[in-house]
Amino acid sequence: MNYKFCIIAVLLVFAPVSVAAQIAAGGAFTLEKSVVAAGGGTSSNGAFSVSGTGGQSAAGTTSANASFSQRSGFWMPGQLAPTAAGVTVSGRVTTADGRGIRNARVTMTGADGTTRTVSTGSFGYFRFMDVLAGGTYVFGVSARRFTFSVPTQVLTVADNGVDLSFAADNEP
């Protein structure tokens, strides 16, 4: 008797389970999950209808009925925007002959007027961390005893790896 009970218990535990779920229902319509591989087609019930699928070949069309509308298709590259992730912008401030300028002040001003300032290290390198990707910034430089014919640069930051360079006009 125990042998038969164990076999039945094992079969019940490992038996495949089939589950069907309805996504939403109400009033005169029912929404069910389905995929039309070739796209297209119409589904209707009374006053409610949907034409096409999200993957249809005529992507970008709009289906509408009273207060309901659905735009089909896929995201296009033009619709993608930069993420809000912080990136690093770095660079170097040098003399006319390429030597780094220590303690130069580099400012970064955003479109909203927010300003951040850093000083260069002993070899003229600087770095702004956690800069919002996709923003446009004005970078400026100043250093005692040095002048710069191009003291500002405007840059739209898209990703890490931005390398700015400022070169002084004269030697002290």
Image (cartoon, grey):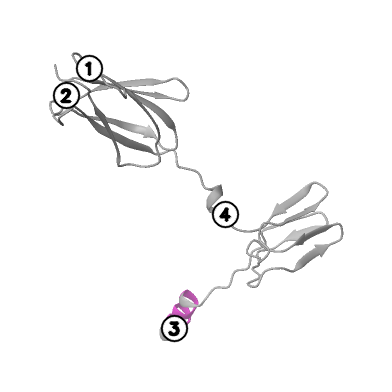
Residue 14 within the magenta-colored segment of the rendering = no
Q: Residues within 10 Å of mark 2 (few under 14, many from 20)?
A: many
Residue 123 percent across, percent down from the top left: 13, 29
- Residue 18, by quadrant, is bottom right
Residue 144 percent across, percent down from the top left: 20, 14
Per the picture, the main secondary structure of the magenta-coloured stretch is helix
Q: Please name the residue shown 80% across and 60% down the image.
A: 49
Residue 63 percent across, percent down from the top left: 76, 56
Q: How many marks?
A: 4
**Marks 4 and 1 close (CB-CB < 8 Å):** no
For marks 3 and 1, the one nearer the N-term is 3
**Marks 2 and 3 close (CB-CB < 8 Å):** no
Q: Which residues are magenta?
A: 5-13
**Residue 143 tag number:** 1
Image quadrant in which the C terminus is located = top left
Q: Please name the residue shown 57% across and 54% down the image.
A: 75
Q: Secondary structure at mark 2?
A: loop
Separation of marks 1 and 2 at Cα, in angstroms: 8 Å
Query: What amino acid is found at the position of numbered circle 1 in the picture?
Result: Ala
Q: Secondary structure at mark 3?
A: helix
Image quadrant in which the N terminus is located = bottom left
For marks 4 and 2, the one nearer the N-term is 4
Separation of marks 3 and 1 at Cα, in angstroms: 85 Å
Q: Which residue is mark 3?
A: 7
**Marks 1 and 2 close (CB-CB < 8 Å):** yes
Q: Nearer the viewer, residue 103 or 1?
A: 103
Q: Which residue is mark 4?
A: 75
Query: What amino acid is found at the position of numbered circle 3 in the picture?
Result: Ile
Separation of marks 4 and 2 at Cα, in angstroms: 47 Å
Query: What amino acid is found at the position of numbered circle 4 in the picture?
Result: Trp
